Image: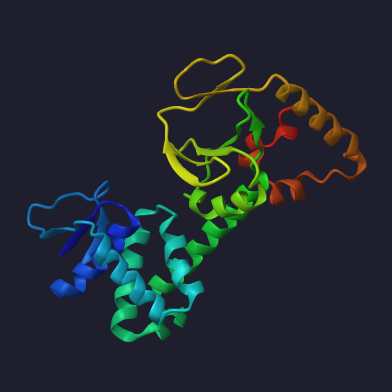
Amino acid sequence: MDYVFDGSFKGLLTAVFDCFERKDFNARLYASAVHQNSVFGIIHHVNTNDACAQRVWNGLIKRLPATEARKIYVAYLAEIPEIYDQLFRLMVNVFKNGGEVINNYGDADILSVTQTAKKVEREKHRMKAFIRFQKSKDHLYFATMEPDFNVLPLITRFFRERYADQQWLIYDNKRRYGAYYDKRQLSEIELSVLDISSDSVATDSVTLDEQEALYAALWQDYFKSTNIASRKNTRLHVRHVPKRYWRYLTEKQA
């Protein structure tokens, strides 16, 4: 039996609910975007249901420590096709055999979910460190990013607390959505394309403040002046700051 869901976290939780409702304990879960229909295969299309999803999540919270329940959500954000089925089986396992199974790293699903969650958490920490805001003409501080995993939901609280008195936007170019904070509340926004320039008039655009180029130049000069050439260790530097993140760093644009 193939279960096919819409790829959302609530859809994933609803699939677990359907599994117990229908007693399909040998089902395999696939996101609709990657599932290939089989002529002889039996398919159950999961209809995402907020109430059912909440019941499953509440059940997990009762059975698992908060850190382990968070691990499930974090691993889901990896957006790896096979992780959905692994999470599905893990949650079914928890409900059938109790929360203690989460500590059994001999189980392939639990080990994979744990390792995947660690990768996502690592990417989250890098985004928190490497994101650089720029100021627009209308006093909006904005930053773009293209992380390997969908970590935006994991970093918004950090930036909301750190920049509570500023209006800002963090936009994920890869996934075409962003988080916008207006000094009062946080909102999710979707744009077709985020265009950034000094004189752009496109609908989905951000026009840079006239002083932004000066600020960037000053920061680049400061970075150069504090850099000690004789102590340069490129291998160590790249280990801590991989090259794929350099495009976010103002000091690397000089």
Q: Residue placed at 56% from the left, 54% from the top?
A: 157
Q: Quadrant of the N terminus?
A: bottom left
Q: Residue placed at 48% from the left, 35% from the top?
A: 173
Left or right, 212 with respect to 79, comes to right
**Is residue 204 in view from this perspective?**
yes
Q: From what the image shows, is residue 211 above or below residue 15?
A: above
User: Whole-percent x and y of residue 163?
Assistant: 65, 46
User: Whole-percent x and y of residue 191?
Assistant: 42, 31
Q: Residue placed at 44% from the left, 43% from the top?
A: 188
User: Whole-percent x and y of residue 217?
Assistant: 79, 25
Left or right, 136 with respect to 50, comes to right
**Front-most of residues 24 and 37:** 24
Q: Quadrant of residue 144?
A: top right
User: Whole-percent x and y of residue 166?
Assistant: 64, 40
Q: Residue placed at 75% from the left, 34% from the top?
A: 251
Q: Quadrant of the C terminus?
A: top right
**Front-most of residues 103 and 51:** 51
Q: Quadrant of residue 199?
A: top right
Q: From what the image shows, is residue 215 above or below residue 31?
A: above
**Is residue 89 in view from this perspective?**
no
Left or right, 209 with respect to 75, comes to right
